[in-house]
Amino acid sequence: MKVLWLIISLINTSVSAQQKSISITIDDVPNTSKYEKDNFSATLLNVLDSLKIPFAIFINRSKITKNSFEDANKILLKKWIENDKSIVGNHTYSHSRYSEVGFDSFVKDIEQGEKLTKQYASLFNKNLEYLRFPYNDLGQDSTQHLQIRAFLESKNYLIAPFTIESSDWMFNYLYEYYLENKEYEKATAIGKQYVEKTIELV
Ligand SMILES: [Zn+2]
């Protein structure tokens, strides 16, 4: 349970005088290296499922081939998409940085990223209608951004940037390091710091 907070990012904070709301979004799904380490148990998905809350997942399809368990990894991806609380988004195939690779290459990466995800989504009557740019990199400048925006609109994609940056990757790095070294108190302290930092930014 503790580890889970570290890989959850939060977006779409809308603040009014009385009320704040957040969306829970998870990038780089499926986490196939964690899946392998956890003896092919979908730990994070199981916890989210038990909480009965909606969440959005942004699929990084190259994760499927990051180790030699491709078939198992595909099953994991399918489970995430099948979950009735998940909203499915594309996070490109290879997690390229738009401003570096440019329009043509980035478009190819988006389309490569759609392949398996779209197929699974349709099995469960879901659409692939959100895109999260890797690194939240929306382009070098407004010209490059408008070019991709027009493409995404033509494909009925909505852009889903994250709005809270609490360096989850950095906390997670330390958190996993302590867990692997069985330094549980330190891991718990890092987890707590991450949650506090994130709440501070909401
Ligand atoms: Zn990412």
Image (cartoon, helix red, strand yellow):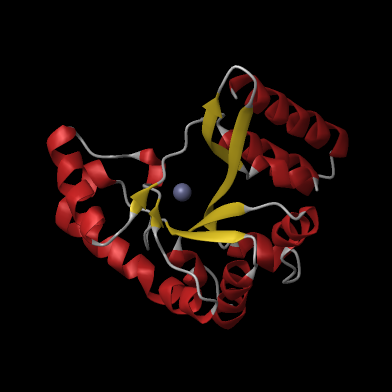
> How many numbered marks, from 0 up?
0
Q: Is residue 50 left or right of residue 111?
A: right
In the rendering, at what x and y percent does residue 14 appear? Answer: 53, 29
In the rendering, at what x and y percent does residue 157 appear? Answer: 33, 56
Residue at left offset 63%, top offset 45%: 7
In the rendering, at what x and y percent does residue 183 appear? Answer: 84, 38
Q: Residue furthest right?
A: 185
Q: Is residue 39 left or right of residue 142?
A: right
Residue 187 found in image quarter: top right
Please tell me which residue lies in front, 59 or 49: 49
Please tell me which residue lies in front, 68 or 121: 121
Residue at left offset 64%, top offset 66%: 84
**With respect to residue 165, does 200 lie above or below?**
above
Q: Residue furthest top?
A: 17
**With respect to residue 113, does 173 lie above or below?**
above
Quarter that holds the C terminus: top right
Residue at left offset 40%, top offset 49%: 132
Q: Residue furthest front?
A: 18
In the rendering, at what x and y percent does residue 147 appear? Answer: 15, 47
Q: Is residue 195 left or right of residue 127?
A: right
Q: Is residue 140 left or right of residue 93?
A: left
**With respect to residue 198, does 83 lie above or below?**
below
Residue 115 found in image quarter: bottom left
Residue at left offset 64%, top offset 60%: 85
